[in-house]
Image: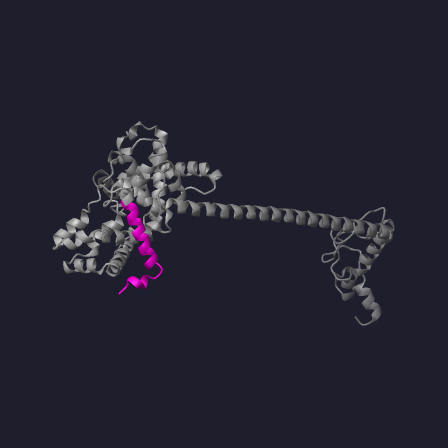
Amino acid sequence: MSSDGKNKQFWKRSAEKVPGSIQHVYGAQHPPFDPRLHANLMKAGSRPPPATPGKPKKATTFQEFESITSDAWDVKDDDDELLAMAAQNLNIEVVMETANKVIENHSKQQERQRQDDTAELDQREEEEEEEDEGQEVCTVDHGDAINELRKLSWSGIPRQVRPITWKLLSGYLPANAERRESVLQRKRQEYFGFIQQYYDSRNDEHHQDTYRQVRMDVQSGSPNPLIWQRRIFERILFIWAIRHPASGYVQGINDLVTPFFVVFLFEYIEEEVENFDVSSLQEEALRNIEADSFWCMSKLLDGIQDNYTFAQPGIQRKVKALEELVSRIDESVHQHMQQYEVEYLQFAFRWMNNLLMRELPLRCTIRLWDTYQAEPEGFSHFHLYVCAAFLVRWRKEILDERDFQGLMILLQNLPTMHWGNEEVSVLLAEAYRLKFAFADAPNHYKR
């Protein structure tokens, strides 16, 4: 390119369509091509067809190449002309008015949405605040009611209200009376769902040892008069063991079902249990008693489960604490047993493992459990002071024995067969005195 004229001629667009030329694309980046709007453009841009149609002649010189090649970058002239023609046919005022209306409508919709959202949020917050206040009031009211019930139950619960009271104090039933029936139905259905799910596996290889031990204990180890009712007890204990693999079944747990079963039986009978044929009850009543006994026993064991895990560390600690406590409250008894080499673990292990059920008649156990249910941590903590008071209660008889065998026979067969509510009340009063003196200052009974 030796001159400006030649440069201008080289960069000028050619009408011929050759490889490398760019055609206009209408759509996303350009206004639609309307022949009515662009008639002049079409007219001005039309050119006569080539004189000799056919295959383009091969360029032999630079000038020939220049004359048949379109530049791919020089599209601005025609684009500007096309956009200018389109702009002449658009009313700018109409466009701006429409755009403003769209923006205004969108703003109004957003504002209405914000107002609706704010109103809904405010209403939800008010409802939640009202609900929270109601729940707080209910919680306070129900909590006060349960605390008052504990105070009234400490000295013993009348037989006719004992079943519902035990269910409430154990935490099996909610304090809210409106929810109790639905909770009962749901928990009873859940228990029998466990029966369907697990009980058929009792003879499987990995469960048969557990079931065999449960069956042996229920048939021969329980002192209660309802031993013939073993199928119910077997189901309760087996299901509990399967659902608590950390501890599994431990001999002695079978005793803990009996008080619940007998107390819940009182809902359906008026006479004494010893004189009643339980098989005469309707099946639904027996099912309800079984499920309620399972759940309340589970609640009890949740608080003392370390008594039944491997090596039973909870019982080991309690027996040691009992020894330390007795050494401070009655040194003569403690030294007498040391003199004849009586270890506390030899007699008190059963007291902790069976919660004194083998030492007391069933009627006394039920009365004792009234207080345990009412006392915070009754089965785990207060029981220690009951055992200490129980041991010291036999001070004279213990000091009269002069050898190991005599002491062991006495301690394993204490004469409580004729005990009643009066003796249990005295025992509990002494236990409470010990707790008041030592519970908040455990170093008082440590040497």
Q: How is the image coloured?
A: one colour
Residue 445 belongs to magenta span: yes
Q: Is residue 196 visible?
A: no
Q: Nearer the viewer, residue 286 or 398?
A: 398
Using the rendered view, name the quadrant where residue 190 is placed.
top left
Residue 278 place in picture, x, y as percent: 29, 30
Quarter occupied by the N terminus: bottom right
Q: Is residue 380 above or below residue 212?
A: below
Residue 198 place in picture, x, y as percent: 33, 39
Residue 427 place in picture, x, y as percent: 28, 49
Q: How many marks?
A: 0
Quarter occupied by the C terminus: bottom left
Instruction: Tell which residue pokes out farthest to the bottom in this image.
Output: 2
Q: Which residue appears at 30% of the width and 36% of the height? A: 232
Q: Nearer the viewer, residue 301 or 375?
A: 375
Residue 165 belongs to magenta span: no
Q: Is residue 77 above or below residue 197?
A: below
Residue 257 place in picture, x, y as percent: 30, 41
Using the rendered view, name the quadrant where residue 77 is placed.
bottom right
Q: Is residue 273 visible?
A: yes
Q: Nearer the viewer, residue 82 or 389?
A: 389
Q: Is residue 163 above or below residue 313?
A: above
Residue 87 appears left or right of 153 = right
Q: Which residue appears at 83% of the width and 70% of the height? A: 4
Q: Nearer the viewer, residue 42 or 245?
A: 245
Magenta extent: 423-447
Characterize the magenta stretch by its predominant secondary structure.
Answer: helix
